[in-house]
Amino acid sequence: MSTLAERAEQELNAILAQYAAGEAEVVRAFFARPRSRDELADMVRRQMGREVFCVGWLERAVRQGRELERTVDRHAFVELLEQIADELRHYALLADLVEWLLGRQLTAEEAREYEVYAVYDPDVPLERQYNPRLPEANAMIDLLRELRARYPTAFTDAVMRLTEGGGGGAFQEASGLAGDEFRERFARAMGRIVEDEIEHGPLRVRGFVQQWIRDEADLALAKELLRTFMAQHLRVRNEIYGSPLSAERLAAIDRGEITPWALPTPPSEVPA
């Protein structure tokens, strides 16, 4: 009989694999037909908006830097700086791609038109976190805010971090694109991003289980939160790609009517 920890890891990974497959399907659906230059640029700029929001965390980093070794743990501070750097690196990669596609430099307004917070930040006024062009992204902020208020905040935040990158399915699917110069350039950009996003999400499951899953009640809550977060994350991904999947198909994915995605294997499990 498997231990609680083993079962927890399997069941949480199964949820991630289900929705990672859904996010990969979004990418395939978008590229299933020819897209205009403007459609491609709009899609990439929507993804840029979920990366560039981290520039707002620089204010938090300054505040935490003043309290380093007093009220701020050095490792947590390094992790914050690394995440800001990762997300802004992704933003720069994608912005360069759009400028190549359009043959000109983006204006500041174009580059940040779809800027929206990817996570709820209680230290930032709520209106600054929304974007009126992105209702599903706004709904994710509302969901995160609601669940943080309803359940223990630290536990909820830890589950939410498992969802970063949506399980990696969309990024991995996009990294395999080929057939024309845009697809190949987009694939290279996604290939550089995917390693960071997988590290941010699926590869954290084992550590999450070890730290947070003490009994069946913890596991049940973690599964409920993860499924809720991932269902909305799928809808955010669909919005980024111009909503190629119907509401009916999204509901079918929620029911598990999809072949699970093959998640990355933690290094300790790689065969010798």
Image: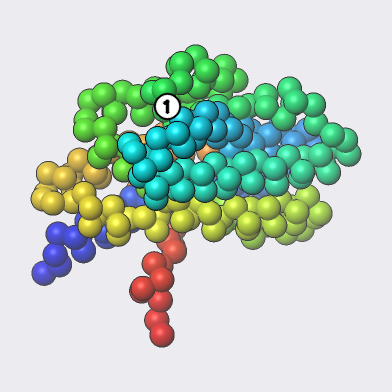
Q: 268 or 69: which is nearer to us?
A: 69
Residue placed furthest toward the bottom: 272
| 118 versus 22 height, above or below | above
Give residue 74's position: percent from left, percent from top.
Answer: 40, 47
Residue sitting at 41 percent across and 22 percent down?
123
Q: Is residue 231 left or right of residue 114?
A: left
The residue to which callout 1 is attached is: 121
Residue 5 visible within the image = yes
Residue placed furthest toward the right: 103
Characterize the local packing of mark 1: few (<14), some (14-19) or many (20 or more) Cα atoms within 10 angstroms: some
Give residue 256's position: percent from left, percent from top.
Answer: 35, 48
Amino acid on which the number 1 mark rests in the picture: Asp
Residue sitting at 56 percent across and 20 percent down?
131
Quarter holding the C terminus? bottom left
Within the image, what quadrant is residue 120 found in?
Answer: top left
Q: 39 or 87: which is nearer to us?
A: 87
Q: 202 or 258: which is nearer to us?
A: 202
Helix, strand or loop for disc 1: loop
